[in-house]
Amino acid sequence: MLYLAIDQHSKQLTVNVRDEAGQVLRRRGGTSDLPVLNRE
């Protein structure tokens, strides 16, 4: 089984996929700051 963890703060978003042992299989991060997103 895999577990999805989403951690959202005012300007940063982190997503992790972990296995049953708690080992991180995939980690992605990005911004949730709208002015930065609108520039792209």
Image (cartoon, grey):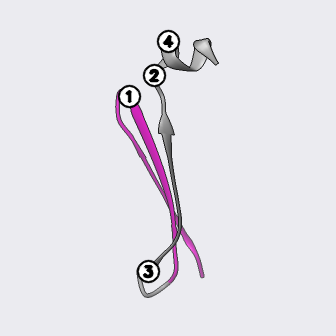
Horizontally, residue 10 falls left or right of residue 29, namely left
Mark 2 lies on residue: 33
Main SS of the magenta segment? Answer: strand
Q: Is residue 17 magenta?
A: yes
Q: CA distance from mark 2 to mark 4?
A: 6 Å
Q: Earlier in the sequence, mark 4 or mark 3?
A: 3
Q: Residues within 10 Å of mark 4 (few under 14, many from 20)?
A: few
State the SS at label 1: loop
Q: Are marks 4 and 1 in contact (CB under 8 Å)?
A: no
The percent coordinates of residue 31 (x first, y second) are 48, 32
Q: Earlier in the sequence, mark 3 or mark 1?
A: 1
> Which kind of residue does numbered mark 4 sit on?
Pro
State the SS at label 4: helix
Q: Which mark is residue 21?
A: none
Residue lying furthest front: 40
Mark 1 lies on residue: 11
Q: Earlier in the sequence, mark 3 or mark 2?
A: 3
Q: Earlier in the sequence, mark 4 or mark 1?
A: 1
- Boundaries of the magenta span: 1-19
> Which kind of residue does numbered mark 3 sit on?
Gln
Mark 3 lies on residue: 23
